[in-house]
Amino acid sequence: MPRFFRSMESPARKGDTVTVDGQDAVHLRRSLRLQIGDEVLLCDGRSTEYTTRITAFPENAVELTVEAVTPSKAEPSLKVTLYQGLPKSDKLEWIIQKCVELGVTDIVPLEMERCIMKLGDKAEKKLTRWQTIANEAAGQSGRGILPTVHPPLSFKAALQAMQGEKTIVCYEGGGKPFCELVSPADTHVNLVIGPEGGIAPAEVEQLLAVGAEAATLGPRILRCETAPIAAVAVLMAMTDNLS
């Protein structure tokens, strides 16, 4: 069944009519060549899914009737905010795509001491592309929400944002295993991953000072684009979100 995200001002109910226009309507009509009576799955981006059936083709649009309303089964019980040290090249695009597929809720590019990447006046353009990648990954993987890629944040601002929240920092200098830090009862975790050069010792000290806990991903040193994917997968497994 084709699946589309469709923002709604208020939740729809069984029997309601929903109109899809723009590029989604073009895709339904011209690319998929759907007909009246065909089913379409809509997601409102707030973890609710609507099983609908095409009832009409008004000009440049598709009219759908809601047949069932159900919570999204794809959304994990754990919300993960990934604070990712800005890597160079297009590595962040890969990280965003794979971590969204695994269930991350928010991604915050983080300016850290050892970051090589300097965005400068390219930040806005980059952010638009990153969000597009996140949206596409959410659609492909059947997510119930559109995860948010936030504007790059300074390390100081990130420390303030994490204050009082459960935060795990993956540190090559060692730490506790994830099984000692996470349980199925957890509902939100901040995950901090460094850039290519790793997290500077002074940054680790500041993270620990605001309540973060250091975690290890094993005896091998993972690349900055591998570590977040491995860490998110472990978090999802430890909270029963990969079963």
Image (cartoon, rainbow, N blue to C red):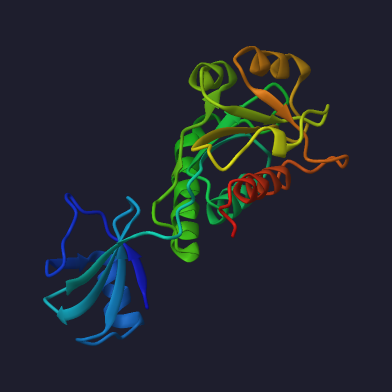
> Would you place residue 241 above or below residue 190 in this image?
below
List x then y, in percent, for residue 175.
Answer: 78, 28
Whole-percent x, y for residue 114 in the image? 73, 25
Residue drawn at the location 40% of the way across and 51% of the way down? 146
Q: Is residue 12 above or below residue 85?
A: below
Residue at image point 53% right, 51% down = 103
Residue at coordinates 70% horizontally, 48% vertically from top-left? 230
Location of residue 218 (image quadrant)? top right
**Nearest the camera: 116 or 56?**
56
Left or right placement of residue 64 versus residue 160 in this view: left
For the C terminus, which image quadrant? bottom right
Q: Is residue 120 left or right of residue 10?
A: right
Viewer-side residue, 220 vs 211: 211
Q: Position of residue 7 (x, y in %)?
A: 25, 54
Tell me: 233 left or right of 13.
right
Count numbered badges in the picture: 0
Q: Position of residue 219 (x, y in %)?
A: 88, 39
Q: Is residue 129 above or below residue 211?
A: below
Quarter of the N terminus within the rendering = bottom left
